[in-house]
Amino acid sequence: GAVVSQHPSRVICKSGTSVKIECRSLDFQATTMFWYRQFPKQSLMLMATSNEGSKATYEQGVEKDKFLINHASLTLSTLTVTSAHPEDSSFYICSARDLTGHYNSPLHFGNGTRLTVT
Amino acid sequence: GENVEQHPSTLSVQEGDSAVIKCTYSDSASNYFPWYKQELGKGPQLIIDIRSNVGEKKDQRIAVTLNKTAKHFSLHITETQPEDSAVYFCAASIWGTGNQFYFGTGTSLTVIP
């Protein structure tokens, strides 16, 4: 089945620094990627949708200057948390779909990144 | 927009028993309903999905049923095993578009050996 690889799985950084999270589709073209944030024991909160070669669309309340998303190729999207603060500590998960061809593709998730800002 | 509700939030069953998780949705345009299993510290994994042109789909011990009229769908796990313990999320979307997926709030399933 489709594989989405996300790195790093865990990262600890100091307050004020930036962190980049990578999301790769390994065996399909990820024309659309979604970035989610998940708090403990809660559901998935959509942060933004990115289409290859286009600017990301952010959900209401998500600061686009803080959470920079780049979807430069059909296999790679990155989320950069800029000037991270402790309240940014969370579990970030990317997901991808292959919407080429017949637009029929389920959503596949990466294994998430646990970000801890000290 | 779409609103997906999921129940129960927690569920404990004895090993070998069945588990049922139910979801409702509000948007009649939704026609694709996947179920995801999330183990601790990992991303959600697709376990089964159903489109609105069928009422039931089965894959070994897992089955999903859909009632379009009532706008609800359910996940059924039979002969549960300890490794089925995880958080399960239902979702609704419109198949064939780039629309987002709307997720339920999750069900924490514990299978007691």
Image: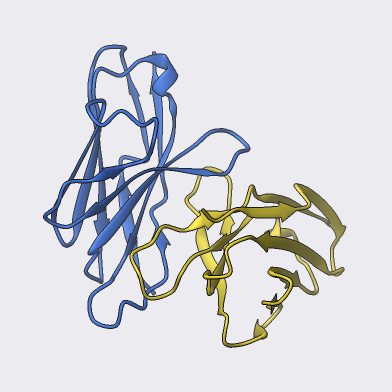
**Picture quadrant where residue A75 is located:** bottom left
> Measured along the vertical axis of the image, is residue B58 above or below residue B28?
below
Decide if residue B87 is in sight here.
Answer: no
Q: Position of residue A68 (x, y in %)?
A: 21, 34
Q: Is residue A68 left or right of residue A5?
A: left
> Measured along the vertical axis of the image, is residue A13 above or below residue B90?
above
How is this picture coloured? Answer: by chain
> Measured along the vertical axis of the image, is residue A102 above or below residue B40?
below
Residue at the spot 65% in from the left edge and 50% down from the top edge: B106
Residue at the spot 35% in from the left edge and 15% down from the top edge: A85
Tally of marks:
0
Q: Is residue B87 left or right of residue A118?
A: right
> Measured along the vertical axis of the image, is residue A21 above or below residue A28?
above
Q: Position of residue B94 (x, y in %)?
A: 46, 70
Q: Position of residue B19 (x, y in %)?
A: 80, 65
Q: Is residue A95 left or right of residue A100?
A: right
Residue at the spot 58% in from the left edge and 51% down from the top edge: B39
Decide if residue A76 is in sight here.
Answer: yes
**Picture quadrant where residue A103 is located:** bottom left
Q: Position of residue A54 (x, y in %)?
A: 14, 52
Q: Is residue A53 left or right of residue A102?
A: left
Question: Color of chain A here?
Answer: blue
Of the 4 image quadrants, the one containing the C terminus of chain B is: bottom right
Front-most of residues B113 and A91: A91
Question: Color of chain B here?
Answer: yellow
Front-most of residues A50 and A6: A50
**Picture quadrant where residue A118 is located:** top left
Residue at the spot 55% in from the left edge and 74% down from the top edge: B49
